Amino acid sequence: MVFADFSFAKVPPIYFGAGKRKLIPTWLKERNASCLLLVIGGKSLQTTGHLAQIEASLKQVGISYEILHCAGEPTPDFIDQTCHTYRDQGIQAVIGIGGGSVVDAGKAISAMLPYTNSIVDHLEGVGKGIPHGGDKVPYLAVPTTSGTGSEVTKNAVISEVGDQGFKKSIRHENLIPDGVIIDSELLVTCPAQVTAACGLDAFTQLLEPYLSPTASPLSDALAWSGLTALGPNLLAACGSGASDLAVREAMAYGSLLSGICLANAGLGIVHGLASPLGGFFPIPHGVVCGTLLAAANETNWTALKQRATNDIAIDKMAKLGEFLDGTPGKDRGYYGDALCRILWQWTETLNIPKLGEYGVQASDLERIVGRTKNRNNPITLTSTEIRSLVESRI
C-alpha cells in the first residue's frame, strides 16, 4: 500500500470505563490545583447522586470548588460574564461535566480566564480575528452524553441565536483538554430523545470524516471502529438497552472517536448546514445533524453515482451499508441504497424532529444555503441539491 502524506492532531490522556469519575481528585492533585470551577448542566448529576459523590471526594482531599450551571449552548455573554466573575478568584482548574454544551463551555472558560477581553474577539469569522494566545487554565472534560466529541478537540463552539446569529469556534492547539474521563455510569440516565440526537450527531461525525477527501488510513481506521461500535447500539441505547453499561460504553466510544476523526479529516455537508441553522434558529446541534443525516447521505449517494462513479466514497458507503444491512452477496449499488434506507429508518424510528418545528420555513432556504460551507464533502453539491435536502426536512 502506498500511503499519502497526512498529519494527525494530538489526543489528550483518556480514562475510559465505569467509575472513572473517582479519578477526578487525583487529576487535580497531579496539577496542584486546590481551587476548582466545576461546570455542570441540568439536574441529572444531582438527581442521581453523582454530584454529591464528586463533591464529597473533593472535600475529602481539601479541594475548594465553585459550581457553575450551563443551561444551554454557551453564548459569548455567558462566557464573558463567567470569566469576569471568576477571573480573580484563584481558579486553578476547570472541569466540565455534562453534554457537549457543558464541555464546550468549560473549555471556553478555561481558555478565557487568563484574558480580560471578550471571547468574541477570537471567534472565527465574527470577531476581530485575534488568534487566541494559547494560555489557559488546566481543563478536564467529563462528557455525560455521547455526541459531540468535544472532549478531544481543540475548539469550543459558541452560539448566538437570531437574525444575525452564528455558531463559531474559538480554536487553539492548547485548548485540547488536558484530560478526558468517560464514565459509563454517568451516561445511563441520559434521556432517550437526547441520546438519539447525540448518537446521530456522533454517527455523522464518524461518517463525514470517513467519506472526506482529506481522510487518511489512520482516520479511516478510527472512523470504522467507531461506526461499527455505535451503529449496532444506537437503537438499543434509546430503548431497551438504555441502562446497559456495555451499550452506553459502545456509544461513548463511538462519540469519542468521532471527535478524533473530525479533528483530523474534517466534516461534510451536514455540519456545513448545522452552522447557519444553529445560528439562525434555536435548534440543538444534535437535532440538526440527526434530522439531516439521511437526506444528506442520500443526496451524496445520488450525486456520486451520477458524477463520480469511481470515487472511493462509493465503496466506503457500500461497505458501511453492507455492515449495517447484513445481507451477503449483493453489489455496491444495493449496499449504498441500504445505507440510505437504514439512515431513514433510524430518523423515523427515533422520531427526530423536522426543522419546521423550530421555525425554519421555505422562505429561509436562500439565506441558509448562502451561509453553508460545502467542504470536506465526498462530492461538491450544487446549491440546488443543498436546498432540496434541507427542504425535505422542513
Image (cartoon, rainbow, N blue to C red):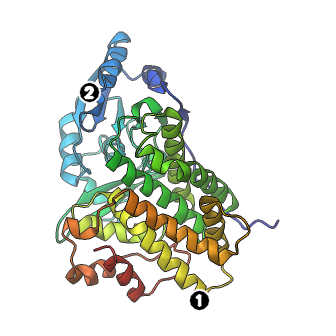
Q: Residue at x 70, y 60 (%)?
A: 217
Q: Residue at x 64, y 78 (%)?
A: 333
Say which quarter of the image contains residue 365. Answer: bottom left
Say which quarter of the image contains residue 53. Answer: top left
Q: Position of residue 351 (x, y in %)?
A: 33, 59
Near-viewer residue (276 or 106): 276
**Is 251 displayed left or right of 354 in the figure?**
right
The three-letter amino acid code for the residue at tag 1 is Arg
If you read the primary sequence from the N terminus, does the residue marked by circle 1 or circle 2 appear first?
2
Residue beneath disc 1: 307
Res. 46 mark: 2
Q: Position of residue 261 (x, y in %)?
A: 56, 56
Q: Residue at x 26, y 58 (%)?
A: 159
Near-viewer residue (124 or 342): 342
Q: Position of residue 392 (x, y in %)?
A: 34, 78
Q: Position of residue 181 (x, y in %)?
A: 47, 33
Name the image quarter holding the C terminus. bottom left
**Is 45 displayed left or right of 264 in the figure?**
left
Is residue 10 in view?
yes
Does residue 128 sit above or below 112 in this rendering?
below
The three-letter amino acid code for the residue at tag 2 is Gln
Name the image quarter holding the N terminus. bottom right
